[in-house]
Amino acid sequence: MSGLPEPAAWQVMLDRYGAFFGNLRSGSRIGVARRSDLGRGEASIVVWEARRGRLHAERRPFRGYADTSLDVMLVGDDGAVAEVERHLADTGLPALKEQVRQGGFVCFLLRTQCDLVEAGYEDVLQSMGVIFMGACR
Amino acid sequence: MTKPGEAKLSYLFQKARWGRFELKNRVKYGACCVSNYNTRDGHITPRELARTKVIAETGCGMITNQGAYPDPRGEGKAYFRQVAIFDDKFLPQFETIARTIHDNGGVAIQQILHAGRYGGIDLGYCVQPSIVPQTLPHFRSPREITRDQIRQTIREHAEAAARAVRAGFDGTEVTSFMGYLLANFNSRFTNQRTDEYGGSIENRGRFMRELIDAIKQATPDNPLILRLNGAELMDRWGGNSEDECFELMRQAAGCGVDMISVTVGWQEAPDSSIGRDIPPGHWNRLAARAKKLLPEVPIAFGVRLPDPVMANECIGNGEFDFWEVCRPLLADPQMLRKAAEDRLDEVRRCVGSLNCLSRLFRDLPYTCTMNPALGHEIEPEYAITPAAVRKRIMVIGAGPAGMEFAVTAAQRGHDVTVFEKSERIGGMLTGYAANDLANRADLQSVISYYEAMARKLNIGLRLGTTVDPRLMREMLHDFDVAVVATGTVLHRAALPPTEDGRKILDGLDVALGREAVNGTVAVLGGGKVGLTIAESLASRGHPVTIIEGQKRLAGDVMPSFKWRHSAWVEELKIASVTGARMSKVTAEGVHVVDGKGEKRIIGADTVIAASPRISNHGLVNEFEWMVDELHVCGDAVLPRGLGPSIHDAYRLGCRI
Ligand SMILES: Cc1cc2nc3c(=O)[nH]c(=O)nc-3n(C[C@H](O)[C@H](O)[C@H](O)COP(=O)(O)O)c2cc1C
Ligand code: SF4
C-alpha cells in the first residue's frame, strides 16, 4: 500500500487551484510519486493530466523516467509527501510549493525547455521555484 | 620590502611550499573563468588570451586556468564557447597561457572539466552514471554511461592532463564543482548503478580513484588537485550527506591527490550556495572540517568568502591552507595588490549578483556587474588611459552611474565635481541597500567604494545641491563638460487617478525612509523595485499586496534570483494580482481589473508606486547651450538597472 495520497485527494487541490494550472495545454501530464515507492518493483504514481483547462488526477503504474507520457515528475520524500497530504483539502498548493523549495520534493523535467514553454509550464515551474532560465544560485 | 597590507595579512601573503613548488603567497585563483569567449569548436581566442593576462597579473601564487573539456565528442562540454583540450591542435594557446602565468610568478594549473550531467551542450544528450532526469530545463536529457565509455573517459582525462603538462602547466585539476561528471559518480543522487561503479560509497568513489590513478600515471611529476564537494546540498533529493562527502575526500587523499579544493552545492541544488543570500564565511566550516580530517593534505577554499581579512584569519586559525578566490577577482583584478598595499577600501567588491554565471547559461560571454572592463581586455577603448586634454567636468547625480563616471574620468586626470541634490551619494542604490533582504552589506559596499575613491581622487562632492538652469547660469564657463546622471523618476502620469484625497507614495521615497508607511499596503509594480519594497515592508509586519500589469512578477530580475523573490513572496505571505489594470485609487483601496477580467478592490492604507519609472533627463535640453560638451548616462538614458548603468558610465568615462 503506497503512502501517496489517492487521486481524489489531489483532485480537491487541483480544482481549488485550477487557475494556477489553467495555462497547461491539453494532454500535459505531471506525475507525483513518493521516492520510497519508486525503488519497488510495481510502483504506482498519481498522474495529473490536463484536459480542456482542467487537471484530472489518476493513479497509474510507474514505468520509469523513460516513460515518455510524462512532462514533469514531482518526487517527494516520505516526510514531504505526508506534509503536503495534511494540507490537500485546503492549502495544498502552497504546501507543495514550499516542499519543492525546501527540497522535500524534486521536480524532474522530462521534456526540453522549448517543449515545456510551449505546453505552458513556464509560470507553473517558476512559481514552484524551478530556475527556469538559468542555473546556480 | 614587506608592504603594509602584507604585514597586516601576514598569513595570506606568506610564502608557501607545495611539493617542489614555492608559492609567493597563499592565494589560488580559482577556475572562475569559463568565459564563453572562445570559438564554438573549443579554440582559445585572442579575447581569452587578453583576459588571461589580467588573471595572471592578479598576483595570486597559483592560477587555475578555466576548465577545458577533455573529449572530442563534446559530452563533457558545458558551455557554448568552452575551451577544449582533447587534441594537440589546441596546444599553442595553452602554451601561451602557461607562459603568461609563469612570467608573472604564478604556479600554473590547468583544470579539466567534464560536465557530465550538465554537459553535451551541443548534443541532444548528456552522460551520467545513471538515468536521472534533469531538474533544470537548460540541460540535456541523460544517457547512462557504459563501462567501456567510463574507461574511455578516464583515458581522455589522463591524456588531457598530459597535454596540459606538455603545454607547460605545472599541474592539473579535475573539478566536480557544482555537479559535474566526477560529482555525478560520487553522488547517490545521480549514481544508482548496480555494477562496481555504483551502490556503496566505496563503489561510487571508484571512478574518482581510477581517475586519480590514471592522471598520476600520465603525469607522475606533476601535482593533481581535486575539487570536491564539502556539501552537495542535494541530500534531501537523495544525494550525499556531508559525512559521505568527507568520506569521499578521504578516499581521494588515500589515492595521493596533492590538494583538495572544497566546494559547495550543485547547479540545481534546492538551496543557495554562492548567491547574495549566503552570508560571507557561511561555508568556512566545511573547509575546517576537511583540514581536520586530512591534516596532511593541502586544502584550498574560498566559496562565498570574498574578504581577504577573513581569509587571512582562517589560514591563521588553520582552517585551510590556500584561499581560492573567484568572483572577487572578477569584480576587481587588483584586489590582491590593493590588499598588499593596505588599500582595501579601494577594492571594488563582488556583490554576488551572479550576472556572470547567468550570462553563461544564456550562451553569452560572461561580464561582471561591477567590472565593466571584464571581457573587453583586448579592446583599448575599455582601458583607462591618461586624457589628452584635462577637462573640468561636472556630474549631476551621485548614483552609481554618476559616481562610476566620476571615478573613471578622474582616474584619467580630469578635474571632476559631482552635484547631488540629496545629502548622500548612492542614489537609488541606497534605497535598495536599505531594504534588501539578501545582503545589505554587499550593496552598501558599492557606495562605500565610491566614497573611498572620491576621497582618493579628490573628486569634488557638492551634496544637498540641486542643479537647475539658474545655478547653471551662475556657473557658466566653470565647466567644460556636464554629465547628466540623474537616474529615473516615477512616471506619475501613468498612475491611476486618485480620489478621496488619497496619495500615492513614490517607492523611492519609501525605500529611503522619506515617507512613513502605515497599515496594509498596496505596491504598484512587481519588478525588482516593487518586490524589494514589498518584501521589506512585509518583513516588518505590514500586510502587502503587489499589483503588477505584466503576467508575472520579477520580470526585470536576474534569472538566477527570480526564485529567491518567489520564495520571499510565499514565505512573507505577500499577495499579488498580476495581469492587472488599475482604474483608480479611492478611500476603499486600489480598483483593479485582474488578469481574468474580474473587477476587484485591493484594500490598502498606504499605496506605493514602485513603477513605472522613466528616465529623468529633463536637464539635457535645458543645458544644451550652456556648456561645451553635454552627455547623459546610466538610467537617465534608459532605466536598465545597476550593471548597465555602471558599464555605460565607465565607457563614457574612458572616452571623454
Ligand atoms: C563565471 C564563473 C565561471 C566559473 N568557472 C568554473 C570552472 O571553470 N571550473 C570550476 O571548477 N569552477 C568554476 N566556477 C566556480 C568558482 O571556481 C567558485 O568555486 C565559485 O564561484 C565560488 O567561489 P567565489 O564565491 O569566490 O566566487 C566558476 C564561477 C563563475 C562565477
Ligand atoms: S557579476 Fe556579480 S557575482 Fe559575478 S563577479 Fe561580478 S559582482 Fe560578482
Image (tube, coloured by chain):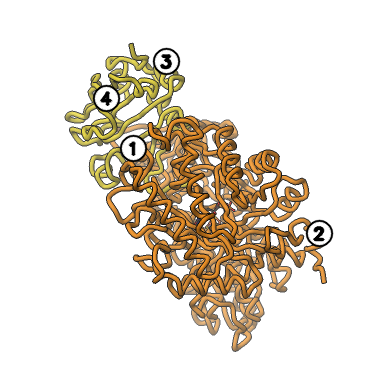
Identify the residue shown where x is 82% and y is 62%: B7
Chain assigned orange: B
Question: Residue A62 got which mark?
Answer: 4
Amino acid under label 4? Phe
In the depicted structure, whether residue B15 falls above or below residue B358: below
**Which residue is labeled 2 in the image?**
B8
In this orientation, which residue lies closer to the viewer: B268 or B171? B171
C-alpha span from label 2 to label 1: 52 Å
Labels 4, 1: one chain: no
**Which residue is labeled 3 in the image?**
A86
**Which residue is labeled 1 in the image?**
B131
Q: Residues within 10 Å of mark 4 (few under 14, many from 20)?
A: some
Q: Which chain hosts label 2?
A: B
Question: Which quarter of the rendered picture does the C terminus of chain B lie within?
Answer: bottom right
Amino acid under label 2? Lys
Mark 4 vs mark 3: in front: 4
Q: Position of residue A72 (x, y in %)?
A: 30, 34
